[in-house]
Amino acid sequence: MKMSNKNKMMATICLLVLTETCARAEVHVQVKNELKHGTRMNVHCRSRDDDLGLHTVDSGDAVKWDFTPNFWGTTLFYCDVQWSEDHSIWYHFDAYNDDRDYRRCHFTCRWMISGNGTLYGYDDVSGYWSWYPLIVIKS
């Protein structure tokens, strides 16, 4: 039985969707505290569906979690971090944004708050740590 062009196209689309769905492997995220002088850092990460809670992270330690990005490519996890003596100042960043991170950190997204309070993210493709902005928020 011969397949029509329409059926071939539908089969190709189904195969592509199935391949993309299977390729959406679990992603591991870590946010590491590399602040100076043993400074502890508060981290609160969440998505639209999951609140990972507030964690206090000692210097040199990290908060970690795993998830599987959604089929639609819209997964977003974001974090608020705080480490200063003024507990009303928090900093915000996107820990996983599917548009930005699907290729950059396909399996592991590593973030680091450096000694001077700068955010760096590791790029699996280039093999380098890159600077990312922290957005200041007040509580």
Image: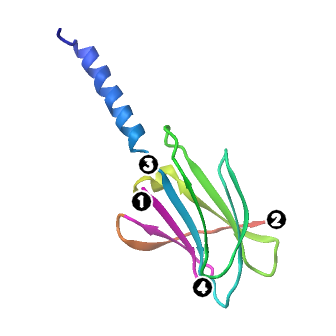
In front: label 4 or label 2? 4
Number of residues whose C-alpha sits closer than 10 Å to that of mark 4, classed few (under 14), some (14–19) or many (20 or more): some
Name the N-terminal-most of marks 1 and 4. 1
Q: Provide the secondary structure element on which disc 1 rests.
A: helix
Q: Is residue 65 left or right of residue 103?
A: right
Q: Which residue is mark 3?
A: 25
Residue under label 1: 104
Label 3 to label 1, Cα distance in Å? 14 Å
Give the percent coordinates (x, y) of residue 23.
38, 44
- Crowding at dot 2, Cα within 10 Å, few <14 / some 14-19 / many 20+, comes out as few
Kind of residue indicated by mark 4: Gly
* Mark sitting on residue 134: none
Residue at 50%, 67% (x, y): give it: 110
Measured in 3D between alpha carbons, the distance from the residue under mark 1 to the one under mark 4, in whole angstroms, is 24 Å
Distance of mark 1 from mark 2, alpha carbons? Answer: 31 Å
Q: Secondary structure at mark 4?
A: loop
Tell which circle, 4 or 2, labels the residue nearer the N-terminal end.
4
Residue linked to disc 2: 139
Amino acid at dot 3: Ala
- The image shows residue 75 at horizontal and vertical percentages of 55, 47
Q: Which mark is residue 115?
A: 4
Instruction: Work out how far the residue at label 4 is from the one at label 3, CA to CA, in angstroms.
Output: 32 Å
Residue type (three-letter) at the residue carrying disc 2: Ser
Q: Which quadrant of the structure image shows residue 54?
A: bottom right
> How many residues crowd around disc 1 within 10 Å: few (fewer than 14), some, or many (20 or more)?
some
N-term mark: 1 or 2: 1
Mark 4 or mark 3: whose residue is earlier in sequence? 3
Question: x, y percentage for residue 29?
Answer: 54, 61
Residue 132 belongs to the span the image colors magenta: no
SS assignment at label 2: loop
